[in-house]
Image (tube, rainbow, N blue to C red):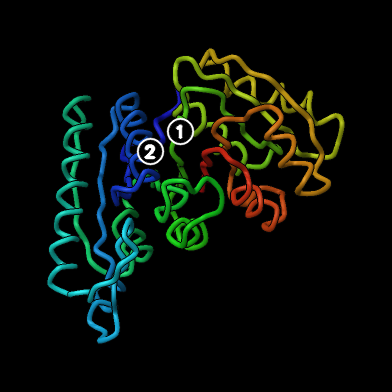
Amino acid sequence: MTSRIIHSIAVAIDCSPHSKASLEAAAEMATRLKAELIGIFVEDINLLHMAGLPFAEQVRLYTATTEKLDTAQLERMLRLQAEQARDMLEHIAQTRTLRHTFRVLRGMVPEQLMLAAPEADILVLGRSGRSPSCRKGLGSTARTALSEGTMNVMLMRPGVTAAEGPLLVLYDCSEASKRALRTALEIAGPSSTLNLLVTNPNPQTVEHCRQETAAIVHEKNIETEYYHLPFTDNRQFISFIRMIDSGLLVIGEDMNLPDATVQELIEKIDYPVLVVR
């Protein structure tokens, strides 16, 4: 048996639909892996700075009327949101009997998350916290976590699960892709299926990968399908992933793929993504 990879899971909570999906995914994984769940709420210092400006106003969502943005009122709103985030975490953790902690921080949201989560084995974020209907594109926090973070990062959105359905691992026989495969197998649910997409251009690689991954996969007893798609361009990759309904996409950082390809995959596909460091 291989040693466990994930012992603690950090999740950013801001009460948006994307963060609620992140919390549910993180709790589901923590339950199965008997891992600690760490909830993090960040009071955005940019909002507080903006509230102090003499011309700052807020627009009411339904009436489109405006009123002065008051710093004290914003402080109260942030405290209320933090309490709501704590309640969300407490409810889901107690229901599942999870070890858990909750932290309230203040500062620039992406930077505070990076400072708060290094000890976690995985950080779960919403793809975007700006709009309940946002299904594509990344928010600034997700971008920072991908470009500057050192831990594994999972990006979630509402309406999908993290690991109960199919998982798609990009595989090229590199050490990065092996780490991605081992992590995917650890978080896979009992009803998950595993798709391995071999990206190496050599036609002989598919059979080699079957043999190489057999020793890694056999202990999990998971249904596995192999595909071979030599990298040619980003659009082909994105179309293929959509065609097979990939579910959670797992990518090893530093695989033999152009950085621009990985970035575009994460930006454009409509599935959860896990980047393994």
With 50 as the anchor, is 276 left or right in this view?
right
Q: Amino acid at mark 2?
A: Ala
| Rendered image quadrant of residue 243 | top right
Per the rendering, the mark at residue 21 is 2
- Figure check: 240 above or below 127: above
Q: Is residue 93 left or right of residue 137?
A: left
Q: Quadrant of the N terminus?
A: top left
Q: Quadrant of residue 80?
A: bottom left
The residue under the point 75% across, 49% down is 234
**Circles 1 and 2 in contact, beta carbons < 8 Å:** yes
Q: Which residue is mark 1?
A: 159
- Nearer to us of marks 1 and 2 is 1
Quick one: SS at disc 2?
helix
Q: Position of residue 167 (x, y in %)?
A: 57, 28
Q: Secondary structure at mark 1?
A: loop
- Few, some or many residues within 10 Å of mark 1 (<14, 14–19, 20+): few
Q: Amino acid at mark 1?
A: Gly
